Image (cartoon, coloured by chain):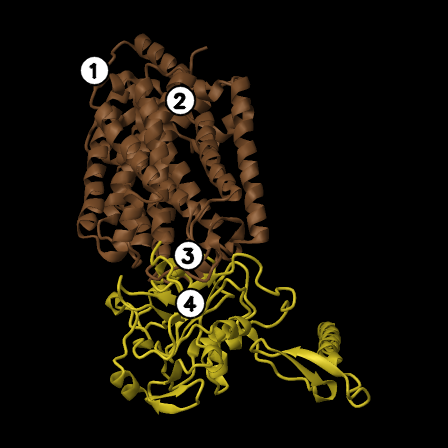
Chain colours: A brown, B yellow
Amino acid sequence: MKRIESADESRKLLDKITFDLTRSIVKKDELTYFWFFILIMFVGVGLWGWGIQINDGLGVTGMRDYVSWGMYIANFVFFVAISLIGFLLSSALHLLKIHWAKPISRVAEQVAIAGVALAGLIIVMDMGRPERLLNVFLHGRFASPIIWDVTVVTTYLTISVLLFYIPLIPDLALLRDRLGDEVPKWKITLYTILALGWKGNPMQYKTVYHAMRVLMLLIIPVGLSIHTVTSWLFAATLRSGWDTTILGPYFVAGAFVAGSAAVIMLMYAYRVRYGLKDYFEDIHFDYMGKLLVFVCLVYLYFNVNEFLVPGYKMKSAEGVHLKNLFAGSFSVMFWVVQVFGLILPLVLLLIKYFRKPLPITIISFFVLISSWFKRYLIVVPTMEHPFLPVQNVPENFHTYVPTSIEIMITLFSFFAALTIISVLAKLFPVITIWEYAEDKGIDKKYLSEKPRN
Amino acid sequence: MKSNSRRKFMKTLGTSLGVAGVVGGSSILSSCNNVESVSGDKIQLLTSSGELVEVDKSMLKPADLPSLSENQKKGREGIPGKSWVMVIDLSKCRNARKCMSACQNHHQLRPEQHHINVLQMQDAEHTAPYYMPKPCQHCDNPPCTKVCPVNATFKREDGIVLIDNERCIGCRFCIAACPYSARVFNWFEPKDADKYKGVTYNIEANVPQKKGTVSKCLFSADRLRDGKLPSCVSACPNGVYWFGDRNEDAVTNGTTQETTTFSTLIKDNAAYTLMEELGTKPRVYYLPPKDRAFPFEGEIDDHHS
């Protein structure tokens, strides 16, 4: 790593970096207000929908006795999935000393926190008796995979928040010292409190490094568990389509695909909105593209295993399920998801042009949407085909069609996740300033200097 | 001073307790005021099993009802020394569906909610179709109770799988886990919710039903406690159901009231259990639909889709 010797040059560069990376915090224009207005509106509408659902019962959804898990559970799996990228980008790659991912780790943590927080909320919204949530802690039975899920989801959320917060402490001190009138006073107070009296001495840095390392190690088993256990909610049952041993790694691989796509889109948004062209560089998009190709290949491998092996045997119940996916009522969704969400992105991203910021963002958009529908395909078709025939029930028990309330609440979850991400971006730098400055060769001592006038 | 204030406190406490007692007592007794004078007046009452009965007012006496928690505790323990089993003779079923309606009455279910459902079955393309009543199989290795996060559904010592709708959080994991589609959910306010408002919950009949919770067949555990056969068994006009105690090795036919040896019945008739390959160990045995008493007159729904 090159070091900048001249003090003046260091200060100048640091000023520039700080100026650029605090733009997201300082910037306040019509668009910001409009964006938050949209977010709050959708969140409000979703909460209103939830109110109706609580009042009238889960019958306001399209779910019935046979398809008793629907869009909410699919959405839950989706949010758990995208949250997993935090563990890959900000921990696994760091520990492997892959440096290009460093500026992206904050973005990945934002996605992780928003994803896992919403996953927890969605599962409560899916409950018939959300007011009895405490029963899970009062009467929890450790034999139930739900209890495992609650345990790992809360642990993952905690570690993710810490992994977001601890590397941020030196930055918070920097913001406390350097941001003046540009931001409201409460923000400075917030930074002062959160900075925990950071002074920037070597002991403190050592503690931060140490804590980060411990957290990065901890999050690996927890991260793997969170999605593996989520897959076990399905794999622990006897139903065809879920009753498979590879569901855990299959979910994890799919999660990396979805999460990478989410991070790429967010990187592009920050790059354009906050003018961070020199920070989220073309090279980062290029690398993310290669990473996406890699995880897509792994996912493709699992998809082949998941569908080819039972498809070869066509056991009776399994056969009905697979026929329904390949050529039945879900076939259009199934093939669109496989082609636009997996095969086409995989092929296109092998070409350098498509790894440029805009093309890869567009591809990521398709990947992300497909991965949502992929979760829908995992949950709903299996439930529509139980072992015994569905008889003596009204027509709407046979097939599942989501209602407007479900769509409202699902949209709520998207906008609530975006709200969390937006708030984090408005409060904290989207790349850690001190790490970035250090990478550029600025000595740490300049970081804790009071700004010159 | 000190003792004075204590005395005062005791006095206040005594008064409030007294008032509470009077109010509570009078509300319990309000239904049997003037017992002698208004004899001949009829009053409608709801029994613990959910039936509406009419009795003379003079018959009313205040009773010590077991509290909810006692009820739940008793319901979780089961009936000591018993091991309930059911045998369903498929050769006798002609889809009369009296079992279904009796069950829905007993458990206050909506018409589309089935604790027991008579299915029209055909095992393979050219085999004979038949009717198959399908209650909860009360598995000895139940996939549903395993996955419950709050121990709301559980297996009792007498073999019955019950649900406590005062504890159920409505996650519906048990519905996903059950390979027999035996569980239903209260998607809306249950049937006649207003009528049963304030009625103490009876865990052994799972009534009154509760919005946002799961419900299922309980082998009419409340009737078993009274020495009666389950509702479906008693209601069958065609002698399809045998029900009894495996420990005694005796089962009774709900229609003919005939009692026979359980082990002989299932041995002589080559009984089987539903999807035994799943390892759930059901307590419901089926006698094959051989030499059928009635012709099959139904229409086979497409088996899986």
- Whole-number angstrom distance, CA of label 4 to CA of label 2: 48 Å
Would you name the residue on which mark 3 appears?
A: A66
Would you name the residue on which mark 2 appears?
A: A269
> Please, what is the three-letter code of the amino acid marked with disc 3?
Tyr
Which badge, 2 or 1, comes first in the chain's sequence?
Answer: 1
> Please, what is the three-letter code of the amino acid marked with disc 1?
Lys
> Please, what is the three-letter code of the amino acid marked with disc 4?
Thr
Would you name the residue on which mark 1 appears?
A: A2
Q: Do the residues labelled 3 and 1 touch (CB within 8 Å)?
A: no
Give the residue drawn at x 23%, y 34%.
A295
> From the viewer's perspective, is the residue at label 4 or at label 1 nearer?
4
Task: Answer yes or no: is residue A292 visible.
Answer: no
Label 3 element class? loop
Q: Which of A273 and A179 lies nearest the eye of the viewer? A: A273
Label 1 element class? loop
Give the residue drawn at x 32%, y 89%.
B249
Give the vertical position of B239 relative to A420 (above or below): below
Mark 1 crowdedness (10 Å alpha carbons): few <14, some 14-19, many ≥20: few
- Disc number at residue B153? 4
- Disc number at residue A210? none
- Whole-number angstrom distance, CA of label 3 to CA of label 1: 63 Å
Measuring from the top left, give residue A302's x and y in whole percent.
Answer: 21, 42
> From the viewer's perspective, is the residue at label 4 or at label 2 nearer?
4
Q: Which residue lies furthest to the right in this view?
A: B37
> Please, what is the three-letter code of the amino acid marked with disc 2?
Ala
